[in-house]
Image (spheres, grey):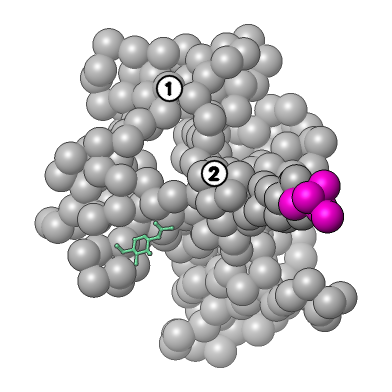
Amino acid sequence: MNLQLPYCFCFFLLLQLPFSTNGQAYKNVSLGSYLTAAAAIGDLPWTSPSGEFAFGFQQVGDAGYLLAIWFNKIPERTIVWSANRNNLAQRGSTVQLTADGQLVLNDRSGTRIRNTANLGGSGAAYGAMLDTGNFVLAGQAGDTLWQSFDEPTDTLLPTQNLNSGGELIAPYLEKNYSDGRFKLILQDDGNLVMYTIANPLTTSNAYWATGSSLGSGNMFIQRLLPVAKGGL
Ligand SMILES: *[C@@H]1O[C@H](CO)[C@@H](O)[C@H](O)[C@H]1NC(C)=O
Ligand SMILES: *[C@@H]1O[C@H](CO)[C@@H](O)[C@H](O)[C@H]1NC(C)=O
């Protein structure tokens, strides 16, 4: 009879293990937190509760580091959003949620490369990588002050909107995330237009349009949730 106890105990521990690891992996990004762009053993990225998405630096060959959000649970860490696709950060650069609640990208000497999020006057109280793939900066009351979903780069995730005036630009090549040759714009007149860009500096040609011009208004397109296969 006494032998039963350790077995039960071990079983209980095994049951607990996955939950406690998840609990440790996920926490809000608190003020003062930062990540450094580094080779091999860099900082762990900021992950969503399920671990599905991560926010941090991805090394792009020898060219530098992309501040990005990616699918974190598949072998090919597919990038869904990036902050500096045309201007990679060098090793030693940091992204920080500053004490006054601004999200900034600094180079290794501490010089600000850019404010990743424009929050206007008041800073955020915390940041969070959500399971939708949206990285948000929230105010004291949990209100969203900034979200990566408002600045789509080359992909729309389920529930994400492409708002009037918004655009998606294809990456240049598979492993080169610079602006590429295709651009999809939801024009202010409501027309959704695909452009080819022969040279990003010259004028481009529209080659496909929905012709959905409706005049101005609160036009947006949304990527819908896939039909649930149990999980969602
Ligand atoms: C994140 O912060 C908010 C607001 O302070 C809080 O309600 C929530 O429980 C926190 N979540 C985690 C996982 O710490
Ligand atoms: C990506 O391609 C562009 C255009 O050829 C080039 O200027 C840039 O340096 C490339 N970036 C990387 C990371 O190779």
Q: Is residue 56 magenta?
A: no
Compared with 114, 110 (above or below) is above
Please give the name of the residue rendered at 52% of the width and 59% of the height, measured from the top-left corner.
130
What is the residue that sits farthest to the right in this orientation?
Answer: 229
What is the residue that sits farthest to the front in this orientation?
Answer: 1
- Residue 144, percent from left and from top: 34, 67
Name the mark on residue 25.
2
Quadrant location, the C terminus: bottom right
The residue wearing badge 1 is 36
Q: Nearer the viewer, mark 2 or mark 1?
A: 2
What secondary structure is the stretch in magenta mostly built from?
loop
Q: In terms of sequence position, does the residue under pointer 2 or pointer 1 come before the other?
A: 2
Compared with 5, 63 (above or below) is above
- Residue 115, percent from left and from top: 29, 39
Please give the name of the residue rendered at 65% of the width and 84% of the height, measured from the top-left corner.
212
Q: Is 34 situated left or right of 25 in this image?
A: left
Name the mark on residue 187.
none
User: Start and end of the magenta stretch?
Assistant: 1-5
Q: CA distance from mark 2 to mark 1?
A: 18 Å
Q: Residues within 10 Å of mark 2 (few under 14, many from 20)?
A: some
Can residue 199 be seen from the camera position used here?
Answer: no
Q: What type is the residue that disc 1 sits on?
A: Thr
Please tell me which residue lies in front, 140 or 18: 18
Please give the name of the residue rendered at 26% of the width and 26% of the height, measured from the top-left corner.
112
Q: What type is the residue that disc 2 sits on?
A: Ala
Q: Secondary structure at mark 1?
A: strand
